[in-house]
Protein backbone atom coordinates (compact mmCIF):
# COMPACT_ATOMS: atom_id res chain seq x y z
CA UNK A 1 0.00 0.00 0.00
CA UNK A 2 1.20 3.51 -0.78
CA UNK A 3 2.77 5.19 2.26
CA UNK A 4 0.41 8.17 1.89
CA UNK A 5 -2.72 6.05 1.62
CA UNK A 6 -2.95 4.61 5.15
CA UNK A 7 -2.60 8.06 6.80
CA UNK A 8 -5.42 9.30 4.51
CA UNK A 9 -7.63 6.35 5.48
CA UNK A 10 -6.91 7.08 9.16
CA UNK A 11 -8.16 10.66 8.87
CA UNK A 12 -11.20 9.60 6.84
CA UNK A 13 -12.10 6.96 9.44
CA UNK A 14 -11.85 9.55 12.22
CA UNK A 15 -14.04 12.00 10.30
CA UNK A 16 -16.57 9.25 9.64
CA UNK A 17 -16.68 8.37 13.35
CA UNK A 18 -17.13 12.00 14.39
CA UNK A 19 -19.99 12.42 11.91
CA UNK A 20 -21.59 9.20 13.10
CA UNK A 21 -21.35 10.29 16.73
CA UNK A 22 -22.95 13.58 15.81
CA UNK A 23 -25.73 11.68 14.03
CA UNK A 24 -26.39 9.59 17.14
CA UNK A 25 -26.80 12.77 19.19
CA UNK A 26 -29.09 14.22 16.57
CA UNK A 27 -31.21 11.05 16.35
CA UNK A 28 -31.61 11.13 20.13
CA UNK A 29 -32.51 14.82 20.04
CA UNK A 30 -35.34 14.13 17.57
CA UNK A 31 -36.67 11.04 19.33
CA UNK A 32 -36.12 10.68 23.09
CA UNK A 33 -34.19 13.69 24.46
CA UNK A 34 -36.11 15.69 27.06
CA UNK A 35 -36.91 19.20 25.74
CA UNK A 36 -34.74 20.77 28.44
CA UNK A 37 -31.63 19.15 27.00
CA UNK A 38 -31.71 21.28 23.86
CA UNK A 39 -29.04 23.82 24.82
CA UNK A 40 -26.37 21.29 25.73
CA UNK A 41 -27.22 19.09 22.75
CA UNK A 42 -26.82 22.02 20.38
CA UNK A 43 -23.36 22.71 21.80
CA UNK A 44 -22.31 19.07 21.59
CA UNK A 45 -23.43 18.65 18.00
CA UNK A 46 -21.75 21.90 16.96
CA UNK A 47 -18.48 20.77 18.55
CA UNK A 48 -18.50 17.41 16.80
CA UNK A 49 -19.41 18.96 13.44
CA UNK A 50 -16.62 21.50 13.79
CA UNK A 51 -14.05 18.82 14.64
CA UNK A 52 -15.15 16.68 11.68
CA UNK A 53 -15.07 19.65 9.32
CA UNK A 54 -11.62 20.78 10.53
CA UNK A 55 -10.16 17.29 10.18
CA UNK A 56 -11.58 16.70 6.72
CA UNK A 57 -10.69 20.09 5.24
CA UNK A 58 -7.23 20.24 6.87
CA UNK A 59 -4.08 21.05 4.91
CA UNK A 60 -2.82 17.60 5.88
CA UNK A 61 -5.60 15.93 3.86
CA UNK A 62 -4.80 18.29 0.98
CA UNK A 63 -1.13 17.24 1.05
CA UNK A 64 -1.91 13.53 1.25
CA UNK A 65 -4.29 13.84 -1.69
CA UNK A 66 -1.76 15.82 -3.74
CA UNK A 67 1.02 13.29 -3.01
CA UNK A 68 -1.18 10.37 -4.00
CA UNK A 69 -2.41 12.09 -7.15
CA UNK A 70 1.17 12.92 -8.14
CA UNK A 71 1.80 9.17 -8.09
CA UNK A 72 -1.23 8.54 -10.29
CA UNK A 73 -3.55 7.31 -7.52
CA UNK A 74 -7.11 8.51 -8.09
CA UNK A 75 -7.44 7.94 -11.83
CA UNK A 76 -7.78 4.16 -12.01
CA UNK A 77 -10.41 1.77 -10.71
CA UNK A 78 -8.60 0.16 -7.76
CA UNK A 79 -10.21 0.77 -4.33
CA UNK A 80 -7.53 3.38 -3.48
CA UNK A 81 -8.25 5.20 -6.76
CA UNK A 82 -11.95 5.38 -5.98
CA UNK A 83 -11.40 6.65 -2.43
CA UNK A 84 -8.89 9.29 -3.50
CA UNK A 85 -11.10 10.42 -6.38
CA UNK A 86 -14.21 10.81 -4.23
CA UNK A 87 -12.31 12.40 -1.34
CA UNK A 88 -10.85 14.98 -3.75
CA UNK A 89 -14.32 15.96 -4.96
CA UNK A 90 -15.69 16.35 -1.43
CA UNK A 91 -12.53 18.07 -0.19
CA UNK A 92 -12.62 20.71 -2.92
CA UNK A 93 -16.35 21.24 -2.44
CA UNK A 94 -16.02 21.74 1.32
CA UNK A 95 -13.08 24.10 0.94
CA UNK A 96 -15.06 26.37 -1.40
CA UNK A 97 -17.00 28.00 1.42
CA UNK A 98 -14.98 29.89 4.07
CA UNK A 99 -15.54 28.61 7.62
CA UNK A 100 -16.34 32.19 8.61
CA UNK A 101 -19.46 31.93 6.38
CA UNK A 102 -20.44 28.67 8.10
CA UNK A 103 -20.36 30.42 11.50
CA UNK A 104 -22.43 33.40 10.31
CA UNK A 105 -24.90 31.10 8.61
CA UNK A 106 -25.50 28.79 11.55
CA UNK A 107 -26.20 31.71 13.93
CA UNK A 108 -28.57 33.34 11.42
CA UNK A 109 -30.31 30.05 10.67
CA UNK A 110 -31.20 29.39 14.28
CA UNK A 111 -32.77 32.89 14.52
CA UNK A 112 -34.60 32.34 11.23
CA UNK A 113 -35.98 29.01 12.47
CA UNK A 114 -37.41 30.75 15.55
CA UNK A 115 -39.09 33.47 13.51
CA UNK A 116 -40.41 30.92 11.01
CA UNK A 117 -42.03 29.02 13.90
CA UNK A 118 -43.52 32.28 15.28
CA UNK A 119 -44.80 33.31 11.86
CA UNK A 120 -46.48 29.93 11.51
CA UNK A 121 -48.19 30.31 14.87
CA UNK A 122 -49.47 33.76 13.91
CA UNK A 123 -50.09 32.72 10.29
CA UNK A 124 -48.24 35.89 9.38
CA UNK A 125 -45.41 35.75 6.84
CA UNK A 126 -44.19 39.27 7.65
CA UNK A 127 -42.75 37.98 10.97
CA UNK A 128 -40.45 35.68 9.00
CA UNK A 129 -39.62 38.00 6.08
CA UNK A 130 -36.62 39.90 7.61
CA UNK A 131 -34.83 36.67 8.54
CA UNK A 132 -35.67 35.13 5.18
CA UNK A 133 -34.02 38.15 3.51
CA UNK A 134 -30.86 37.32 5.46
CA UNK A 135 -31.05 33.63 4.53
CA UNK A 136 -31.48 34.54 0.88
CA UNK A 137 -28.43 36.82 0.98
CA UNK A 138 -26.35 34.14 2.70
CA UNK A 139 -27.46 31.51 0.20
CA UNK A 140 -26.55 33.79 -2.72
CA UNK A 141 -23.16 34.31 -1.12
CA UNK A 142 -22.66 30.55 -0.74
CA UNK A 143 -23.61 29.98 -4.35
CA UNK A 144 -21.19 32.66 -5.51
CA UNK A 145 -18.25 30.71 -4.02
CA UNK A 146 -18.58 28.07 -6.77
CA UNK A 147 -16.23 29.31 -9.48
CA UNK A 148 -17.61 27.10 -12.25
CA UNK A 149 -21.20 28.31 -11.78
CA UNK A 150 -22.73 30.92 -14.07
CA UNK A 151 -24.80 32.45 -11.26
CA UNK A 152 -25.44 31.95 -7.52
CA UNK A 153 -28.47 29.69 -7.98
CA UNK A 154 -26.45 27.38 -10.22
CA UNK A 155 -23.70 27.53 -7.61
CA UNK A 156 -26.08 26.55 -4.84
CA UNK A 157 -27.47 23.66 -6.89
CA UNK A 158 -23.90 22.35 -7.07
CA UNK A 159 -24.04 21.55 -3.33
CA UNK A 160 -27.24 19.52 -3.76
CA UNK A 161 -27.15 18.00 -7.26
CA UNK A 162 -23.70 18.69 -8.75
CA UNK A 163 -24.61 16.71 -11.83
CA UNK A 164 -27.38 19.01 -13.05
CA UNK A 165 -27.62 22.49 -14.50
CA UNK A 166 -30.49 24.83 -13.69
CA UNK A 167 -31.47 24.91 -17.38
CA UNK A 168 -31.58 21.15 -17.51
CA UNK A 169 -33.89 21.00 -14.50
CA UNK A 170 -35.99 23.75 -16.00
CA UNK A 171 -36.56 21.67 -19.15
CA UNK A 172 -37.22 18.52 -17.16
CA UNK A 173 -39.75 20.30 -14.95
CA UNK A 174 -41.52 21.93 -17.90
CA UNK A 175 -41.88 18.52 -19.54
CA UNK A 176 -43.31 17.12 -16.31
CA UNK A 177 -45.73 20.01 -15.72
CA UNK A 178 -46.93 19.75 -19.33
CA UNK A 179 -48.58 16.39 -18.64
CA UNK A 180 -49.08 16.46 -14.86
CA UNK A 181 -51.13 19.66 -14.73
CA UNK A 182 -53.74 18.56 -17.32
CA UNK A 183 -53.86 15.05 -15.80
CA UNK A 184 -54.52 16.50 -12.35
CA UNK A 185 -57.31 18.68 -13.77
CA UNK A 186 -58.87 15.66 -15.48
CA UNK A 187 -58.70 13.65 -12.25
CA UNK A 188 -60.28 16.49 -10.25
CA UNK A 189 -63.26 16.59 -12.57
CA UNK A 190 -63.85 12.92 -11.67
CA UNK A 191 -62.95 13.18 -7.99
CA UNK A 192 -65.91 10.98 -7.00
CA UNK A 193 -64.45 7.94 -8.75
CA UNK A 194 -62.06 7.10 -5.92
CA UNK A 195 -63.39 6.89 -2.38
CA UNK A 196 -61.09 7.41 0.55
CA UNK A 197 -63.63 8.79 3.04
CA UNK A 198 -63.88 5.41 4.79
CA UNK A 199 -60.24 5.46 5.94
CA UNK A 200 -60.91 8.53 8.09
CA UNK A 201 -61.65 6.48 11.22
CA UNK A 202 -59.91 5.73 14.51
CA UNK A 203 -56.91 3.35 14.07
CA UNK A 204 -55.57 2.19 17.49
CA UNK A 205 -51.95 3.18 18.02
CA UNK A 206 -50.52 -0.14 19.17
CA UNK A 207 -51.86 -1.88 16.05
CA UNK A 208 -50.59 0.91 13.81
CA UNK A 209 -47.14 0.29 15.16
CA UNK A 210 -47.43 -3.44 14.49
CA UNK A 211 -48.47 -2.69 10.90
CA UNK A 212 -45.50 -0.35 10.30
CA UNK A 213 -43.14 -2.89 11.72
CA UNK A 214 -44.58 -5.78 9.68
CA UNK A 215 -44.53 -3.84 6.40
CA UNK A 216 -40.96 -2.57 6.79
CA UNK A 217 -39.77 -6.02 7.83
CA UNK A 218 -41.49 -7.56 4.81
CA UNK A 219 -39.65 -5.34 2.32
CA UNK A 220 -36.34 -6.29 3.91
CA UNK A 221 -35.54 -3.66 6.54
CA UNK A 222 -33.23 -5.56 8.87
CA UNK A 223 -34.12 -5.12 12.55
CA UNK A 224 -30.89 -6.74 13.64
CA UNK A 225 -29.16 -3.69 12.13
CA UNK A 226 -31.90 -1.12 12.50
CA UNK A 227 -34.65 0.44 14.62
CA UNK A 228 -38.00 2.10 14.06
CA UNK A 229 -39.03 4.81 16.55
CA UNK A 230 -41.84 7.37 16.76
CA UNK A 231 -41.28 11.07 15.89
CA UNK A 232 -43.26 14.06 14.68
CA UNK A 233 -41.51 14.32 11.30
CA UNK A 234 -40.38 10.98 9.88
CA UNK A 235 -36.69 10.70 8.96
CA UNK A 236 -33.89 8.21 8.37
CA UNK A 237 -30.34 8.38 9.65
CA UNK A 238 -27.51 5.90 9.84
CA UNK A 239 -24.36 5.67 11.93
CA UNK A 240 -22.84 2.99 9.71
CA UNK A 241 -24.26 0.45 7.26
CA UNK A 242 -24.58 -1.80 10.35
CA UNK A 243 -26.82 0.60 12.30
CA UNK A 244 -29.66 2.25 10.42
CA UNK A 245 -32.43 4.20 12.20
CA UNK A 246 -35.83 5.09 10.80
CA UNK A 247 -38.72 6.95 12.41
CA UNK A 248 -42.36 7.57 11.61
CA UNK A 249 -45.41 9.19 13.17
CA UNK A 250 -48.65 7.87 14.58
CA UNK A 251 -51.81 9.84 13.80
CA UNK A 252 -54.90 8.17 15.31
CA UNK A 253 -57.24 8.99 12.40
CA UNK A 254 -54.64 8.64 9.65
CA UNK A 255 -53.08 5.20 9.57
CA UNK A 256 -51.56 5.68 6.13
CA UNK A 257 -49.53 8.81 6.91
CA UNK A 258 -47.35 6.84 9.31
CA UNK A 259 -47.59 3.68 7.21
CA UNK A 260 -46.17 5.22 4.04
CA UNK A 261 -43.81 7.35 6.12
CA UNK A 262 -42.29 4.17 7.51
CA UNK A 263 -41.99 2.56 4.04
CA UNK A 264 -40.41 5.76 2.70
CA UNK A 265 -37.81 5.92 5.45
CA UNK A 266 -37.19 2.18 5.22
CA UNK A 267 -36.40 2.72 1.53
CA UNK A 268 -33.73 5.26 2.52
CA UNK A 269 -32.53 2.77 5.14
CA UNK A 270 -32.21 -0.11 2.66
CA UNK A 271 -29.90 2.07 0.56
CA UNK A 272 -27.68 2.86 3.56
CA UNK A 273 -27.62 -0.80 4.59
CA UNK A 274 -26.56 -1.75 1.04
CA UNK A 275 -23.60 0.66 0.82
CA UNK A 276 -20.28 -1.08 0.13
CA UNK A 277 -18.82 -2.91 3.13
CA UNK A 278 -15.29 -2.68 1.67
CA UNK A 279 -15.42 1.13 1.80
CA UNK A 280 -16.73 1.58 5.35
CA UNK A 281 -15.53 4.81 7.01
CA UNK A 282 -14.59 6.45 3.69
CA UNK A 283 -16.51 8.93 1.49
CA UNK A 284 -17.03 6.07 -1.00
CA UNK A 285 -19.49 4.43 1.43
CA UNK A 286 -22.01 7.20 0.84
CA UNK A 287 -25.01 7.57 -1.41
CA UNK A 288 -24.50 8.97 -4.89
CA UNK A 289 -26.66 12.07 -4.26
CA UNK A 290 -29.81 13.30 -2.48
CA UNK A 291 -31.84 12.65 -5.63
CA UNK A 292 -30.59 9.08 -5.80
CA UNK A 293 -31.34 8.62 -2.09
CA UNK A 294 -34.83 9.92 -2.64
CA UNK A 295 -35.31 7.54 -5.56
CA UNK A 296 -34.91 4.63 -3.14
CA UNK A 297 -37.43 5.96 -0.61
CA UNK A 298 -39.99 6.80 -3.31
CA UNK A 299 -39.54 3.46 -5.01
CA UNK A 300 -40.43 1.50 -1.88
CA UNK A 301 -43.10 3.93 -0.72
CA UNK A 302 -44.92 4.42 -4.01
CA UNK A 303 -43.95 1.98 -6.73
CA UNK A 304 -44.02 -0.93 -4.29
CA UNK A 305 -46.14 0.20 -1.30
CA UNK A 306 -48.88 1.86 -3.35
CA UNK A 307 -49.13 -1.01 -5.85
CA UNK A 308 -51.95 -3.55 -6.14
CA UNK A 309 -49.65 -6.61 -5.72
CA UNK A 310 -48.35 -5.19 -2.44
CA UNK A 311 -51.91 -4.92 -1.12
CA UNK A 312 -52.80 -8.41 -2.32
CA UNK A 313 -50.08 -9.55 0.05
CA UNK A 314 -50.53 -7.09 2.89
CA UNK A 315 -54.29 -6.61 3.09
CA UNK A 316 -55.02 -9.83 5.06
CA UNK A 317 -52.30 -8.86 7.54
CA UNK A 318 -53.75 -5.40 7.98
CA UNK A 319 -57.23 -6.83 8.33
CA UNK A 320 -56.04 -9.14 11.12
CA UNK A 321 -54.80 -6.05 13.01
CA UNK A 322 -57.90 -3.93 12.30
CA UNK A 323 -60.86 -6.31 11.90
CA UNK A 324 -63.60 -3.75 12.59
CA UNK A 325 -62.09 -0.87 10.57
CA UNK A 326 -61.59 -3.17 7.57
CA UNK A 327 -64.74 -5.23 7.83
CA UNK A 328 -66.26 -5.78 4.39
CA UNK A 329 -63.26 -4.11 2.72
CA UNK A 330 -60.87 -5.57 0.18
CA UNK A 331 -57.30 -5.15 -1.05
CA UNK A 332 -58.71 -3.17 -3.98
CA UNK A 333 -60.51 -0.76 -1.63
CA UNK A 334 -57.24 0.01 0.17
CA UNK A 335 -55.28 0.24 -3.08
CA UNK A 336 -57.75 2.79 -4.43
CA UNK A 337 -58.02 4.83 -1.22
CA UNK A 338 -54.24 5.20 -0.78
CA UNK A 339 -53.88 6.35 -4.38
CA UNK A 340 -56.53 9.05 -4.20
CA UNK A 341 -55.37 12.12 -6.13
CA UNK A 342 -56.37 15.77 -6.19
CA UNK A 343 -55.07 19.33 -5.89
CA UNK A 344 -53.78 20.04 -2.39
CA UNK A 345 -51.96 22.79 -0.54
CA UNK A 346 -49.47 20.59 1.26
CA UNK A 347 -46.37 19.15 -0.43
CA UNK A 348 -45.50 16.42 2.05
CA UNK A 349 -48.99 14.89 2.00
CA UNK A 350 -49.41 15.25 -1.77
CA UNK A 351 -50.23 12.28 -4.02
CA UNK A 352 -48.04 11.00 -6.85
CA UNK A 353 -49.67 13.14 -9.55
CA UNK A 354 -49.57 16.47 -7.74
CA UNK A 355 -46.32 16.05 -5.78
CA UNK A 356 -43.91 17.25 -8.46
CA UNK A 357 -46.05 20.31 -9.14
CA UNK A 358 -45.35 21.39 -5.55
CA UNK A 359 -41.63 21.09 -6.25
CA UNK A 360 -41.91 22.96 -9.55
CA UNK A 361 -43.71 25.82 -7.78
CA UNK A 362 -40.83 26.20 -5.31
CA UNK A 363 -38.19 25.93 -8.02
CA UNK A 364 -39.83 28.69 -10.06
CA UNK A 365 -40.16 31.03 -7.06
CA UNK A 366 -36.58 30.40 -5.95
CA UNK A 367 -35.23 31.24 -9.38
CA UNK A 368 -37.15 34.52 -9.44
CA UNK A 369 -35.90 35.35 -5.93
CA UNK A 370 -32.31 34.70 -6.95
CA UNK A 371 -32.65 36.65 -10.19
CA UNK A 372 -33.94 39.65 -8.23
CA UNK A 373 -37.25 39.51 -10.12
CA UNK A 374 -39.21 38.78 -6.97
CA UNK A 375 -38.87 40.53 -3.58
CA UNK A 376 -39.14 38.49 -0.36
CA UNK A 377 -42.06 40.62 0.80
CA UNK A 378 -44.03 39.71 -2.34
CA UNK A 379 -43.48 35.97 -1.89
CA UNK A 380 -46.90 35.10 -0.36
CA UNK A 381 -48.71 36.74 -3.28
CA UNK A 382 -46.44 35.04 -5.84
CA UNK A 383 -47.07 31.72 -4.08
CA UNK A 384 -50.84 32.14 -4.39
CA UNK A 385 -50.50 33.00 -8.08
CA UNK A 386 -48.39 29.93 -8.83
CA UNK A 387 -50.84 27.74 -6.88
CA UNK A 388 -53.62 29.06 -9.07
CA UNK A 389 -51.64 28.41 -12.27
CA UNK A 390 -50.44 24.90 -11.37
CA UNK A 391 -53.30 23.57 -9.21
CA UNK A 392 -56.25 25.88 -9.76
CA UNK A 393 -56.60 26.47 -6.00
CA UNK A 394 -55.40 29.19 -3.61
CA UNK A 395 -54.52 28.68 0.09
CA UNK A 396 -56.50 30.78 2.54
CA UNK A 397 -53.51 31.65 4.70
CA UNK A 398 -49.68 31.61 4.67
CA UNK A 399 -49.54 28.57 6.94
CA UNK A 400 -51.11 26.49 4.17
CA UNK A 401 -48.97 28.38 1.66
CA UNK A 402 -45.53 29.93 1.78
CA UNK A 403 -44.82 29.04 5.44
CA UNK A 404 -45.31 25.27 5.14
CA UNK A 405 -41.72 24.09 4.55
CA UNK A 406 -38.86 24.43 7.01
CA UNK A 407 -36.19 24.47 4.24
CA UNK A 408 -35.97 28.21 3.57
CA UNK A 409 -35.47 28.94 7.28
CA UNK A 410 -31.99 27.43 7.04
CA UNK A 411 -31.32 28.72 3.55
CA UNK A 412 -32.14 25.36 1.95
CA UNK A 413 -32.77 26.81 -1.49
CA UNK A 414 -32.14 24.58 -4.54
CA UNK A 415 -32.84 21.54 -2.34
CA UNK A 416 -36.37 20.74 -3.57
CA UNK A 417 -35.44 19.52 -7.09
CA UNK A 418 -33.89 16.37 -5.55
CA UNK A 419 -37.37 15.16 -4.53
CA UNK A 420 -38.60 15.27 -8.11
CA UNK A 421 -35.41 13.73 -9.47
CA UNK A 422 -36.04 10.94 -6.98
CA UNK A 423 -39.53 10.27 -8.37
CA UNK A 424 -38.32 10.23 -11.96
CA UNK A 425 -35.30 8.03 -11.22
CA UNK A 426 -37.40 5.60 -9.15
CA UNK A 427 -39.71 4.95 -12.10
CA UNK A 428 -36.82 4.40 -14.49
CA UNK A 429 -35.12 1.98 -12.07
CA UNK A 430 -38.35 0.07 -11.54
CA UNK A 431 -38.91 -0.25 -15.30
CA UNK A 432 -35.39 -1.65 -15.69
CA UNK A 433 -35.87 -4.05 -12.77
CA UNK A 434 -39.13 -5.28 -14.34
CA UNK A 435 -37.32 -5.96 -17.62
CA UNK A 436 -34.80 -8.11 -15.77
CA UNK A 437 -37.35 -9.69 -13.42
CA UNK A 438 -40.64 -10.32 -15.21
CA UNK A 439 -42.06 -12.15 -12.16
CA UNK A 440 -41.78 -9.14 -9.90
CA UNK A 441 -45.50 -8.51 -9.35
CA UNK A 442 -46.12 -12.17 -8.62
CA UNK A 443 -43.40 -12.17 -5.97
CA UNK A 444 -44.78 -8.95 -4.40
CA UNK A 445 -48.22 -10.57 -4.16
CA UNK A 446 -46.74 -13.41 -2.13
CA UNK A 447 -44.79 -11.03 0.11
CA UNK A 448 -41.38 -11.75 -1.38
CA UNK A 449 -39.58 -8.48 -2.04
CA UNK A 450 -36.09 -9.92 -2.03
CA UNK A 451 -35.65 -10.15 -5.83
CA UNK A 452 -36.17 -6.37 -6.09
CA UNK A 453 -33.98 -5.58 -3.12
CA UNK A 454 -31.23 -7.77 -4.53
CA UNK A 455 -31.52 -6.08 -7.91
CA UNK A 456 -31.24 -2.63 -6.30
CA UNK A 457 -28.30 -3.82 -4.23
CA UNK A 458 -26.43 -4.94 -7.32
CA UNK A 459 -27.35 -2.07 -9.62
CA UNK A 460 -27.45 0.87 -7.20
CA UNK A 461 -26.55 0.36 -3.53
CA UNK A 462 -23.21 -1.44 -3.76
CA UNK A 463 -21.71 1.30 -5.94
CA UNK A 464 -21.77 3.80 -3.06
CA UNK A 465 -20.45 7.16 -4.26
CA UNK A 466 -18.58 5.71 -7.24
CA UNK A 467 -20.84 7.29 -9.87
CA UNK A 468 -22.59 10.62 -10.21
CA UNK A 469 -26.39 10.58 -10.37
CA UNK A 470 -26.58 10.57 -14.17
CA UNK A 471 -23.83 7.98 -14.51
CA UNK A 472 -25.48 5.69 -11.97
CA UNK A 473 -28.86 5.92 -13.71
CA UNK A 474 -27.14 4.86 -16.90
CA UNK A 475 -25.12 2.10 -15.25
CA UNK A 476 -28.25 0.73 -13.55
CA UNK A 477 -30.79 1.08 -16.37
CA UNK A 478 -28.68 1.19 -19.53
CA UNK A 479 -30.27 4.51 -20.47
CA UNK A 480 -29.74 8.18 -19.70
CA UNK A 481 -32.20 9.82 -17.31
CA UNK A 482 -35.43 10.62 -19.15
CA UNK A 483 -39.02 11.12 -18.00
CA UNK A 484 -40.46 8.38 -20.24
CA UNK A 485 -40.73 5.64 -17.62
CA UNK A 486 -42.14 8.05 -15.05
CA UNK A 487 -44.76 9.35 -17.45
CA UNK A 488 -45.79 5.86 -18.53
CA UNK A 489 -46.09 4.78 -14.89
CA UNK A 490 -48.18 7.77 -13.76
CA UNK A 491 -50.42 7.85 -16.83
CA UNK A 492 -50.95 4.09 -16.77
CA UNK A 493 -51.77 3.92 -13.10
CA UNK A 494 -54.00 6.98 -12.79
CA UNK A 495 -55.89 6.67 -16.10
CA UNK A 496 -56.93 3.22 -15.00
CA UNK A 497 -57.70 4.23 -11.40
CA UNK A 498 -59.89 7.14 -12.44
CA UNK A 499 -61.24 5.41 -15.53
CA UNK A 500 -60.03 8.16 -17.89
CA UNK A 501 -59.61 7.67 -21.65
ZN1 LIG B 1 -37.01 11.06 1.70
Image (spheres, rainbow, N blue to C red):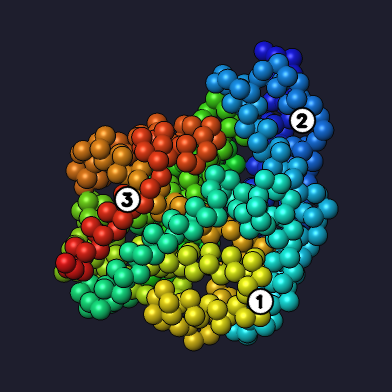
Q: Which residue is mark 3?
A: 484
User: Which is nearer the N-term, disc 2 or disc 1?
Assistant: 2
CB within 8 Å, label 2 to label 1:
no
Q: Please determine whether, in this image, residue 395 is positioned above or below residue 253.
A: below
User: Which is nearer the N-term, disc 3 or disc 1?
Assistant: 1
CB within 8 Å, label 3 to label 1:
no
Question: Could you say whether the residue bearing mark 3 is in a helix, strand or loop?
Answer: helix
| Marker count (numbered) | 3
Q: Residue 37 versus residue 469: which sits nearer the camera?
A: 469
Q: Position of residue 363 (x, y in %)?
A: 53, 64
User: Which is nearer the N-term, disc 3 or disc 2?
Assistant: 2
Q: Is residue 323 visible?
A: no
Q: Position of residue 416 (x, y in %)?
A: 53, 60
Instruction: Name the residue located 69 percent from the left edge and 77 percent from the top edge.
Output: 129
Question: Could you say whether the residue bearing mark 1 is in a helix, strand or loop?
Answer: loop
Q: Which residue is mark 1?
A: 375
- Horizontally, is 134 left or right of 437 in the view? right
Q: Position of residue 484 (x, y in %)?
A: 32, 50
Q: Nearer the viewer, mark 3 or mark 2?
A: 3
Distance between the alpha carbons at the discs numbered 3 and 2: 43 Å
Q: Please determine whether, in this image, residue 429 is positioned above or below residue 70.
A: below
Q: Which residue is mark 2?
A: 61
Question: Could you say whether the residue bearing mark 2 is in a helix, strand or loop?
Answer: helix
- Horizontally, is 132 left or right of 452 in the view? right
Instruction: Name the residue located 31 percent from the left edge and 70 percent from the top edge.
Output: 182
Distance between the alpha carbons at the discs numbered 3 and 1: 36 Å
**Label 2 CB-ligand 1 distance < 8 A:** no
- Quadrant occupied by the N terminus: top right
Q: Residue 338 versus residue 40: which sits nearer the camera?
A: 338
Amino acid sequence: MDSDYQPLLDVLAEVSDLNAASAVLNWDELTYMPKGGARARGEQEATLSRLAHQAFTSDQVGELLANLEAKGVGSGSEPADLVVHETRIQYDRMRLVPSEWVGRHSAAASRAYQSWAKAREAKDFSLFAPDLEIQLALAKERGSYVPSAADPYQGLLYFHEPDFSVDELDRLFSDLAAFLSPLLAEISSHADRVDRSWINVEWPEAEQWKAFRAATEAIGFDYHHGRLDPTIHPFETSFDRDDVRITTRIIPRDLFSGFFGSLHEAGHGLYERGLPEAFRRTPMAEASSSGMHESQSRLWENLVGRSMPFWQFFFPRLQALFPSQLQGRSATDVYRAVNWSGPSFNRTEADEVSYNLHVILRFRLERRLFAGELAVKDLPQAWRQEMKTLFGIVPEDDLAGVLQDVHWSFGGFAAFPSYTLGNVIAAQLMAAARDDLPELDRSFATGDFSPLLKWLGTHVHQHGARYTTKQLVEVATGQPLVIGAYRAYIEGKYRSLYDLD
